[in-house]
Image (cartoon, rainbow, N blue to C red):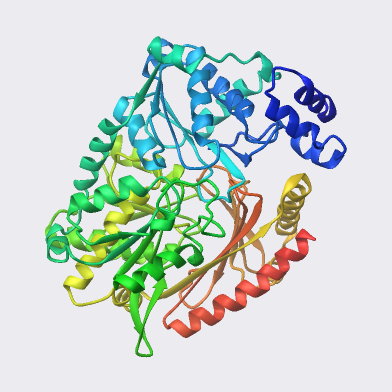
Amino acid sequence: MDYMNLYNIWSTDSFFNEATRSELQAIKDDTKEIEERFYRSLEFGTGGLRGVIGAGTNRMNIYTVAKASAGLAQYIVASGEEAMKKGVAVSFDSRHFSPEFAEVTACTLAAYGVKVYLSDELRPVPMLSYSVRHFGAFAGVMVTASHNPPKYNGYKVYGEDGGQVTTDAANAILSNIEKFEDVRTIKMMDINEAIEKGLVTKFGSDVDKAYTKMLTELVIDKDAIDRQKDMSIVYTPLHGSGNKPVRRILEEVGFKNVHVVKEQELPDGSFPTVKTPNPEDPAALTMGIELAKSVDASIVVGTDPDSDRVGVAAKTIENGEVVYKTFTGNQMGIMLLDYILNSKKEAGTLPENSFAVTTIVSTKLAGAICKAYGVELQEVLTGFKYIGERIKFDDEFGNKHFQFGFEESYGYLSGLNVRDKDAVVATMLICGMAAQSFDKGETLFDRLNRIYEKYGYGFESAVSFTLEGKEGLEKIANCMTSMREELVASKNSADADKLIGVTGVKAVRDYASSVRYEFSDSVSTSEINLVKSNVLLYELGGDKGLDWACVRPSGTEPKLKIYFGIYASDEASAKARLEEVKKIMSEAVQAKLL
């Protein structure tokens, strides 16, 4: 059915509520906007849905959520009666309509006979992941758009292990979703009826207590925390779901001097005090830093709306003045990695066959750190679902021992009972690491500099081009196609140097075709043993032979992203080359997007 016919149905049929019909009737003369809303169904990717809130098949609303839930329900029904009884755990964050979307999810699943455990209030991603395992559920759903702007919401689906669903499962769910061509045919049960029939059960403090107890078992160097229990900490949940669980675990492990940014404490889907509720953006911590100055805090921590990412600033002295500086996701990742491995090795608790996991676009210094402790480092594609899979395959079902996982986008995980990035455990570990540093008479920046001095200087950065709407998606796709065509046509190193404008390209990994192209006087190829993904990674050699750049479309936002990593024996050389490569390649890619 074409987009105008769909628009006419949605804007006139009494099946759709009055708010939906009114919203659509208000754009009756805007053909382009109508096309944007109805030219496709909101894409269900490997992690679920994410989109702008509004009326239409290409928007997040109760009808598209019901459609996704009906497809998930059919997938579960096809998996058998036992899967239906195990059911689905459902939680939500502080975004607009998150509670409503969570209830629609529960009511739709219940209508198809699937048991549901529904959170009685907002709870973050890591607690949803944990609750899947806690209840022995067959699947999980988290209503969130993570750190996206306020106009977005989303729907993430989790598997039985508590990790995001596998590609095969996502494809099976999608095939069921596509069977519902008309959302008016989807069944939905009244929430009170579903509760009365035992198909929906609400959960709350029981999971809170179990999750918190589990986290206390992951504490590193409790003695240092006890000695530094009065360390001044500022925390901000950025209007999100981390407020209660983060404060609960900090109190439980012994920190007595935690200050919360009151203006950002309570849930608010408009995120009124920040430009974007993303701790990757240093500006998101501005209010936290101002509070830190007034209470002389040593550290500032901020979590995003679904509390799976965490940003950190710490006090230091520059030019004789007290300032608060932020850490990048890579810097915090290598600090936590070194903290965990070193502390366990000194305590004699680091097992043989230990491993850590990071992503192909994260810092290469992780490899040197792991090597120093005799720990295997595994690299996976971007997305924490792949880190979760390595935990399942190599620890839960294998003979190896997972120690830590991180990605450059401020996501970290320790422990086995959560299978997605966890800002709650990360906050606990970061504060514990700060306590250990202060106990040794150093700051967090002293700790970071020690790592650089030992393993070399590495600096990473990223550039994003935002291209919204149908036209934007087409430009991103055309850019990736053009870059691949030029790669395949390259015959030698001279051709390779023209690919992104940066000289010295040694090899290119095309994860979509699973082929690595290595350049010299000719081209040789080899196979990449990872799942296929729309990613191009350029190996650039450099001082330590580790430099790289990577291009990929975002899986959650209308963006084309470029990542960079440069490594050298001294700080100045690494930073200078990073800026050079970043400028040249960004201009080359941007030209292809015009």
Please give left or right for residue 129 compared with residue 537 in the image. Answer: left
For this orientation, the residue located farthest to the bottom is 319
Residue 334 lies, in percent from the top left, at: 35, 64
Q: Residue at x 22, y 49 (%)?
A: 218
Query: How many numbered marks does the figure carry?
Result: 0
Q: Out of 6 and 426, give the one closest to the viewer.
A: 6
Q: Residue at x 45, y 54 (%)?
A: 238
Q: Quarter holding the C terminus?
A: bottom right
- Quadrant in the picture for residue 332: bottom left
Residue 339 seen in the current view: yes
Residue 222 lies, in percent from the top left, at: 14, 57
Q: Out of 536 and 458, give the one closest to the viewer.
A: 458
Residue 508 lies, in percent from the top left, at: 61, 60
Please give left or right for residue 236 compared with residue 44 in the image. Answer: left
- Quadrant in the picture for residue 466: bottom right
Q: Out of 103 and 316, give the one closest to the viewer.
A: 103
| 215 relative to 41, above or below | below
- Quadrant in the picture for residue 434: bottom left
Please give left or right for residue 429 compared with residue 592 in the image. Answer: left
Q: Quarter holding the N terminus?
A: top right
| 371 relative to 195, above or below | below
Residue 321 lies, in percent from the top left, at: 36, 86
Residue 78 seen in the current view: no
